[in-house]
């Protein structure tokens, strides 16, 4: 075993101080709440304006995602700040009602955005590749049912410890709760963390596949229409796929470390080899913090990747004061015509 030097002790002391500081949790909660409120305001205005157009389904999914992220900041964030206010203690008894509720909230609000992102990608993939089938199958009522089903599935997974499948415990430094991994873990704990990780990674993989298919389909359609001297692809389809790719990339960066760590913990538990405690603690803290940033970044992906914002960026980078004859203008005309056609068909 290597001897720990003064620099190592100093580094671990700084990491411990950072983990026990409530400032980061408070700032993260405040920024996340403000970001999601702004995004909800923009989405509500867009949904009211485009309620009868083909983008309404996407806006409904996006609104549900942002609303879930908003609640995911308010509820767990308030509990974490409450635990900080009671003082940081690594000797808390677990599980208690507060720990069970906080752990279930983190699992629920962790899975919901991943499931919703997957559903949004699948809906857009169907709309881009099979527009007639999409018009026949997808409706506002069915979209609301799908959102409720996603919430219920995530809730069932979060409540599994009630049926003794897995357990929530306080995690270092005693200010948050999550699934028990590595430390005194049982077979049921291993199954629970494996289920959580597999569900999350599967959702990300399906989002990647669906968004890739949608992107390739739109690019091929655009190339074909250029050769035939027709108008460009639908701008709202392009805009939605760009936003979905942004949401998917953000989710992968923020969630993959924690989900992969869950699979690693399963492997260690299966091989009966427990890694050193300190690296495990800080991996968990950093993984959860990174995952919490996803709820902050999701609304900004939608806010910044809207057509209106991209149009302003286009003007600033090209120095043009108008967009007549530009790609953005052609996209908007095509989008309006296609939206009006879809409205007439539905009427």
Image: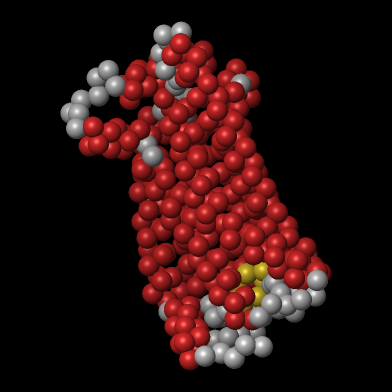
Q: Is residue 82 above or below residue 294?
A: below
The residue shown at (45%, 49%) is 298
The residue shown at (53%, 60%) is 291
Where's residue 29, x and y in %?
42, 64
Mark yes or no: residue 266 visible. Answer: yes
Q: Is residue 328 above or below residue 77?
A: above
Where's residue 259, x and y in %?
63, 59
Q: Is residue 192 above or below residue 280?
A: above
The residue shown at (53%, 30%) is 215
Observer-nearest residue: 53 or 20? 20
Observer-nearest residue: 346 or 337? 337
Label total for image: 0
Where's residue 43, x and y in %?
40, 40
Instruction: Please indicate whether residue 241 sits to the left or right of residue 157 in the image.
Output: left
Where's residue 233, x and y in %?
45, 20
Tell which residue pokes out farthest to the front in this image: 2
| Quadrant where the N terminus is found in the figure | bottom right
Occupied quadrant, residue 270: bottom right
The residue shown at (49%, 50%) is 250
Observer-nearest residue: 285 or 160? 285
Mark yes or no: residue 312 visible. Answer: no
Observer-nearest residue: 199 or 343? 199
Instruction: Please indicate whether residue 70 sits to the left or right of residue 156 in the image.
Output: left
Instruction: Please indicate whether residue 151 sits to the left or right of residue 316 in the image.
Output: right
Occupied quadrant, residue 155: bottom right
Q: How is the image coloured?
A: secondary structure
């Amino acid at each position: 075993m290597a001897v720990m030097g003064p620099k190592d002790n100093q580094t671990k002391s700084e990491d411990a101080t950072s983990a026990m500081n409530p400032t980061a949790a408070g700032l993260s909660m405040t920024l996340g709440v403000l970001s999601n409120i702004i995004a909800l305001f923009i989405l509500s205005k867009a949904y009211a304006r485009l309620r009868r157009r083909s983008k309404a389904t996407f806006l409904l999914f996006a609104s549900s995602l942002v609303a879930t992220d908003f609640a995911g900041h308010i509820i767990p964030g308030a509990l974490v700040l409450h635990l900080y206010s009671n003082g940081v203690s690594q000797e808390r008894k677990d599980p208690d009602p507060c720990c069970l509720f906080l752990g279930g909230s983190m699992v629920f609000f962790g899975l919901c955005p991943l499931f919703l992102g997957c559903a949004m990608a699948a809906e857009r993939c169907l709309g881009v590749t099979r527009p007639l089938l999409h018009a026949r199958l997808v409706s506002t009522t069915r979209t609301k049912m799908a959102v409720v089903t996603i919430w219920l599935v995530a809730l069932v997974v979060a409540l599994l410890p009630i049926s003794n499948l897995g357990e929530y415990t306080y995690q270092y430094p005693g200010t948050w709760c999550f699934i028990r991994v590595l430390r005194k873990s049982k077979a049921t704990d291993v199954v629970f963390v494996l289920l959580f990780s597999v569900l999350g990674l599967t959702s990300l993989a399906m989002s990647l596949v669906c968004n890739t298919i949608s992107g390739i389909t739109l690019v091929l359609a655009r190339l074909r229409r250029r050769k035939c001297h027709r108008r460009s692809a639908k701008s709202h389809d392009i805009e939605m796929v760009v936003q979905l790719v942004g949401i998917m990339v953000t989710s992968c960066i923020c969630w993959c470390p924690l989900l992969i760590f869950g699979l690693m913990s399963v492997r260690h538990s299966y091989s009966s080899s427990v890694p050193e405690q300190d690296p495990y603690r800080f991996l968990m803290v950093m993984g959860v913090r990174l995952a919490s940033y996803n709820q902050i970044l999701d609304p900004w992906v939608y806010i910044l990747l809207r057509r209106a914002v991209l149009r302003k960026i286009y003007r600033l980078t090209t120095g043009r004061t108008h967009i007549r004859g530009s790609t953005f203008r052609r996209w908007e005309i095509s989008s309006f015509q296609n939206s009006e056609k879809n409205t007439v068909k539905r009427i």
